[in-house]
Amino acid sequence: GSGGYGQQGLMKRRVGTDVGKKEIKYEVVINRNGYVMENLVLKDQFTGDGLSLLEDTVVIKDSNDVALEKGIDYLLSYTAPSGTTPGSFEIKFLKTVDERLTLTYTTHFERNSDGTASYKNTAGISWKYGGKDYNIGGITVDTTPLGFTKENGVKNGSYNAVEKKITWSIHTNYARLPIGNPYIISDVLDASQEYVTDSLTVFTYEVNGAGG
């Protein structure tokens, strides 16, 4: 799904995906009802080793739309993905919270090492009040960007019935992964087709925000 709720104490949703930039933006609303939360900690665990946090995009605003200050109001600790181990981040609030907070941040995605292009992240919070421990967890957003990141390419053809010709287009490396040298593209024609001499052209292409 695109969002989740946790007793109004924690809400999370995806607010945008840009396939061209390979970015996913999220919004997390903490403490919507304005309860008193001491020692508040938010944790967000990624699933999929292709997802990473763009730390400079982290913004937390209070109920008056005023941004909190990193190092004064909160501490951010980010663990980048390593090998096949997904990343995560943690935010520790340094002051007692008694109002709604809104966190926005952006992640960068690459094709996962297992060849998939589905990205989950699961948020949870813990806090204290009146000498008791409280927590809300399991608020997950699952994103599969549009386009062909998983397949890492697409092939299509258009048929000209008058000339009895098919023009084929092969878009490779859609995920824009590092490529080796030589980079080989091959296509096998069946017995009913014959290659038209000098019809081959090679081009670069860009992927737009919508994945086209």
Image (spheres, helix red, strand yellow):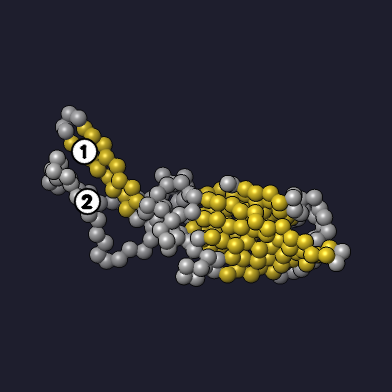
Residue 186 x/y as whole percent? 22, 54
| Camera-side residue of 118 and 196 | 118
Going from N to C along the chain, the mark reached first, 1 or 2, is 1
Residue 131 x/y as whole percent? 85, 67
- Relative placement, left or right, of 193 versus 179 is left
Secondary-structure class at tag 2 = loop
Secondary-structure class at tag 1 = strand
Residue 211 x/y as whole percent? 44, 46
| Camera-side residue of 18 and 156 | 156
- Relative placement, left or right, of 189 versus 104 is left
Which residue type carries mark 1? Ile
Residue 70 is at least partly visible in this image: no
Q: CA distance from mark 1 to mark 2?
A: 14 Å
Query: How dense is the environment of label 1, judged by Cα within 10 Å: few (below 14), some, or many (20 and up)?
Result: some
Identified at 16% across, 32% down, the residue is 163
Q: Are the residues flagged by discs 1 and 2 in contact, CB closer than 8 Å? A: no
- Please count the marks in the image: 2
Q: Quadrant of the C terminus?
A: top left
Identified at 87% across, 64% down, the residue is 130
Camera-side mark, 1 or 2:
2
State the residue position of label 1. 166
Picture quarter containing residue 36? bottom right
Which residue type carries mark 2? Asp
Picture quarter containing residue 99? bottom right
Identified at 53% across, 63% down, the residue is 52
Q: Which mark is residue 13?
A: none
Query: How dense is the environment of label 2, judged by Cα within 10 Å: few (below 14), some, or many (20 and up)?
Result: few
State the residue position of label 2. 187
Residue 118 is at least partly visible in this image: yes
Identified at 25% across, 51% down, the residue is 202
As drawn, the residue found furthest toward the top would be 162
